[in-house]
Amino acid sequence: MALEMRDRCERCEVAELTETSPARICTYECTFCVPCSEAMQDVCPNCGGELVARPRRGAARVGAGESS
């Protein structure tokens, strides 16, 4: 099961987050831009969990599973 790569910060709703943008997530996949995460001291306001760097999908994974 892949992570849901949300494209907006849940706090400021301004940050455009692409699949390769740096972002922070908690275990429930709440998603925040780095400045908002730092302002919240890397604690998710929804669940109280730790916000950590969201993994990036590499170029090799784009289109994975498609046949040539």
Image (cartoon, grey):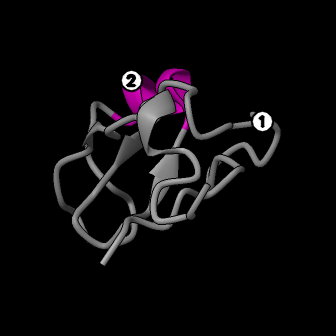
Q: Nearer the viewer, residue 13 or 29?
A: 29
Q: Is residue 19 left or right of residue 57?
A: right
Tell me which amino acid carries mark 1.
Glu
Q: Residue 10: where, in percent of width, then height?
A: 62, 56
Q: Secondary structure at mark 2?
A: helix
Q: Residue 67: where, in percent of width, then height?
A: 56, 63
Q: Residues within 10 Å of mark 2 (few under 14, many from 20)?
A: few
Residue 57 visible in the snapshot: no
Q: Is residue 21 left or right of residue 47?
A: right
Q: Secondary structure at mark 1?
A: loop
Q: CA gap, disc 2 to disc 1?
A: 17 Å
Q: Residue 52: where, in percent of width, then height?
A: 23, 38
Q: Residues within 10 Å of mark 1 (few under 14, many from 20)?
A: few
Quadrant location, the C terminus: bottom right
Q: Is residue 58 left or right of residue 43?
A: right
Does residue 46 sit above or below 14 in this rendering? Answer: below
Highlighted range, magenta? 33-40
Residue under circle 1?
A: 16
Does residue 3 sit above or below 42 in this rendering? Answer: below
Residue 39 is covered by the magenta coloring: yes
Residue 65: which disc? Answer: none
The residue at the point 58 percent across, 52 percent down is: 63
The residue at the point 64 percent across, 47 percent down is: 9
| Image-quadrant location for residue 45 | bottom left
Residue with the most extreme right position: 14
Residues at circles 2 and 1 in contact by the CB criterion of under 8 Å: no
Residue with the most extreme front position: 68
Residue with the most extreme bottom position: 1
Q: Say which label, 2 or 1, has the lower sequence index.
A: 1
Q: Nearer the viewer, residue 4 or 29?
A: 4
Residue 38: which disc? Answer: 2
